Amino acid sequence: MTQTSHTILIVEDEPSLSEALKDKFTREGFHALTARNGEEGLKIAQEKVPSVILLDIVMPKMDGVTVFKKLQESQDTANIPVIFLTNLSNAEQVAEELGAGNYQYLVKSDWDMKDVVAKVRSTIQEKHGVAWAVEE
Amino acid sequence: MKTTFKKNPTRFRIALLIGFSLFLVVFTVHSTGAQDDHTASEEAKGKIVWEKLRSNETNCTQLADGDFEVLGEYFMGQMTGTSHEAMNTAVEQMKGKEGEEQMHSALGKRLSGCDPLAAFPPQNVSFMQAILNMDSDQAGEGGIGSLSLIALVLLWIFVIGGIVVLIKRLIKRSRDGFLPVHIAASDISKERYGGGETNKQELEKKAPLPRFPFRVKIGTKLAFFLLLAGLFPMAVFGVLYIRNEQSALEKEIFNTLVLLAESKELRVFEYFKDITSRTHDFSSDGYIRDETKRLITTDSVKSQEALSRHLSVNKKPLDDKLAGISILDKDGTIIASTDQNEIGKNESDDIYFKEGKESSTLVRTDPGDVHFGIVSPFIVAVPLTDKDTHEFLGVLVNAFDSHKLESVLSSNFITRQSAALEAIVGKNPETLHVYIVDHEKNVILHPIRKEIDPVHDVGVSTLPVRECMEKGKEVVGSYIDHSGAEVLGASMCLVEEGMVLVVDIDKRTALLPVEQARMRFYGIITVLGALIVAISFLIARMLTKPIKALRESAEIVRTGNLHYRAKVATTGDEIEELGHAFNAMTASLEERQRWVEEEKKKLAVLLENLPLGVLMLRAPRGEIIALNGRGAALLGNDFENDPQRWERINKEDGERYPFEELPVNVALHTGHSITKNDLYMEEVGGRTLALRMAAVPVRDDAGTLRFVAVVFDDVTKEKEIDRSKTEFVSLASHQLRTPLSSINWYSEMLLDGDAGKITKEQKKYLQEIYRGNKRMVELVDALLNVSRIEMGTFMVEPVPMNVVAAATSILADLKKVIKKKKLVVKEVYAKDIPQIMADPKLMRVIFQNVLSNAVKYTPEEGNVSLALEVLKKGQLVDGRKVSREMLLITVADTGYGIPKGQQDRVFTKMFRADNVRERDPEGTGLGLYLVKSIVEHVSGNIWFESEEGKGSTFYITLPLEGMKKKEGARRLG
């Protein structure tokens, strides 16, 4: 199966988690980019325009919510689906701040990685209408 | 109903009054009967005889003279008033014992009816008159006196009683119309000092005070009652007495008049008899008869002269009353006379000639007729007959001077019997008239008023004249005389002579003593009345002076001077007691006020130093009336005087707090208590102060909102702590979750073989790590929820939702386990379950926990049932009555049950029963704690029944009206 691999951006300050996600998504056939803080994440996103961004919230330099807001400011990045992947159980607070938008909210500890992958795939599929073959 | 005098003093007083009146009656009657001075034994004997006669034990024929005597004595004793006096006078006149006995005997015979024609001593007219009069008087006289007195006293009692009843009625009727003084007073005290309600009611209950219908001073009342009680009966008694006196005097005067008339009648008779017999005597004179015969037959002048001379010389001087004598022949021609001028006149038409021819006749000549120089003389004519042959010769006529009769009538007319009449007539002799009226109603003789006589020869048609002329009746009584004056009079008919003898006296003059007595009486009454009024006002002044003083004292106390004590007059009566009571009241009021002041002081100190802000406002406009120290410190010292003070209060976001939603305004407008803790205020230093404020309405006894008490406190610190707590939990959970995620994901990758193939054993170990980690995540989530609940900050967001659908979706989640354990699940949903307002997340937590518990703790092939139904108000469920419409969720299982000894700890945090802990070590022990917290947070209820080894049933009720929205907090995770 030959297909252009989708680029995803993982913005996560916790190295162990960042590593785990990068390994997993790479293994799942994605082109995974990582950033260790919000600023960096925003920069990469603006440069590479990934298919999906997995965005932590509590981060040094710039938090995830601000990053999302910045992304929305540019036409290039506004359409990138964002999945907040956080350990804060304050989805409502985020929702209040951002309103309904092009994002989803997952609590890290409640999600197995394969479920996160499935979520990313379905999000891309929704956006691009591409049938996604699952590699074993 | 039994009423004692003690209970009802009014009745006692009435009884006393009646008793006293009866005593008066008895006393009066007794004293009236006991004034006679007759020998009691004689009278007693007479009474016995009278009783015997009346009961027909004896009859008149069996009585001895002595019996009649004592009978007479008895009757005398029974007589009172005029009769008695008349009788006594009569008896006194009968000098000597014999005469008296005779009199008594005659009286006895007469009055006992034994001899109606009892021989009265004829020589005493007054006795006869007395006894005759007595027939009519005897029955009544004495009786009337005492009877009228009894009647008077009774009348007095009734009148006074009637007036008392009338006044009571008046008072009763007007009771509702007036503001009773004591209520007004208690109102004043209430306004000033508060309370007083109970006292008013007690007073009201104790004695319904009489209320006089109009404002009258005590003096006036007293005067009125004294006049009523004293003067009125006296006046009535006096009037009756005077009337009695008057009638007695009238009677006496009548008696006297009758006696006078009779004695005069006798004199008149005597006079007439005298002149008639004188004339008869002349007619039998032989010389006259012979000479007349001769004169008739011879008609000689000599005989005529001789006869005339005989009459003039021999006959006329025999009687000084004689005016002249004439002899008429058969034809009526005067043939001889003492007056030569008369001879030859023919008098055949004159009545005396006509009647004189037949028999001896007394004639009164026409008025104005003059015979022998005498005006209107009495003429007596008798026939002259022949001595031998008795042949009618002519008529002898004697003319008598009527003035001689007048002197008879006028002389000695005052009888000794009537002292009163004597007294009256003695003073005014001209008012007593004794005169004779002839058949033509002409007054022929009127001796007393001769000189001023306008009535002489004037026809009178007064009552006695008419009565006598027309009916032959004699009159005794009061009537109008010819001159139009009212007189008292008596008449005697002189039937043969065709004349009436009238004795009358001017009534006003006659009754002068009574009139004088009446005037005296009026004077006495007036003086007495004035005296009573004066005394009443004096007494009233005496009574009211200390009362006035008390009232003035009351005014002083009313103005607030409770130290003041009234000077109590030592009157030794109720007024003095009132004064002491007043002072005692003032003293107790002072004591009370002191106590109130003390309490106030204590309270003020307490309030001032309370570590809470207290603000007091007056309803309805909300003026500040008090602000304590802490309050001023919190709100600012100028808060009290700042008209824009409430604009300082903001919401959390800095917006001004809506005026109408301020707790104080809610309390003022709705009258309900309210507490709010979302008030903020900028402090001077720029710091924001968070306030919690409770407003409580203060009502008076009538329920009117008077004040609003606002209690408030600085909750800035609390809010900060709260916020940091929440942040802490949030961060803590974040920090805990990060390593948990790490473990989760790496063990997942290892298990998935991402790091290369693993052995079975390695896989088993990794699975343990993986599962343990999952439990840790669950535990962290649950703890997060618990901490949120305990902070009371979780949000409730009710939306209309289908609870049945929520329940079934949870069951669907559990399907895998149910299938695996081969459990039988029974679902019963009532048809009438409506959509209810509920927070889906909370409902999910509830269903999730109770259903998963049932599934988890029921062994394989067991039963689990879920039922939803609606409970009506008052319906019983598991022995509990529901207070409103509720949704009932029942979850039953045939599981392990909860051991009896641990049932009371089921809803406590982290509790897990021993029997399940063994079977399933995974479990947080927080599920039911969470459910209970949620259910109670939304006004529901949860309880259960359970038996170890048999199963459990959980009941949850939620109000059908739904959950109330609750903001400003966080959702449960």
Image: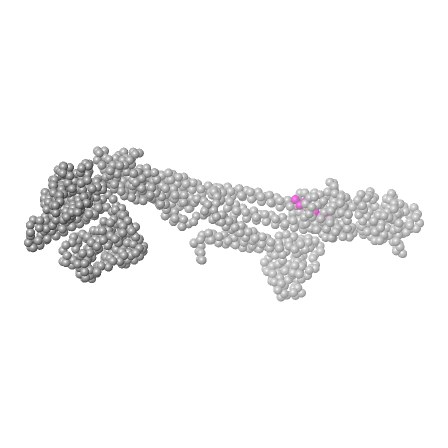
The image shows residue B695 at horizontal and vertical percentages of: 29, 42
Q: Residue at x 88, y 47 (%)?
A: B333
Query: From this viewpoint, is residue B138 visible?
Result: yes
Q: Quadrant of the N terminus of chain B?
A: bottom left
The image shows residue B633 at horizontal and vertical percentages of: 24, 36
Q: Left or right: where does residue B247 sit relative to residue B263?
A: left
- In the image, is residue B673 part of the stretch drawn in magenta? no
Q: Quadrant of residue B46?
A: bottom right
For the image, the number of numbered tags is 0
Q: Left or right: where does residue B382 sit relative to residue B756?
A: right
Q: Taking B207 as reference, is B896 above or below it?
A: below
Q: Quadrant of residue B709?
A: top left
Q: Residue at x 8, y 54 (%)?
A: B764
Q: Point out the stretch of residues depicted in magenta.
A: B502-508
Q: Nearer the viewer, residue B181 or B632?
A: B632
Q: Left or right: where does residue B395 sit relative to residue B703?
A: right
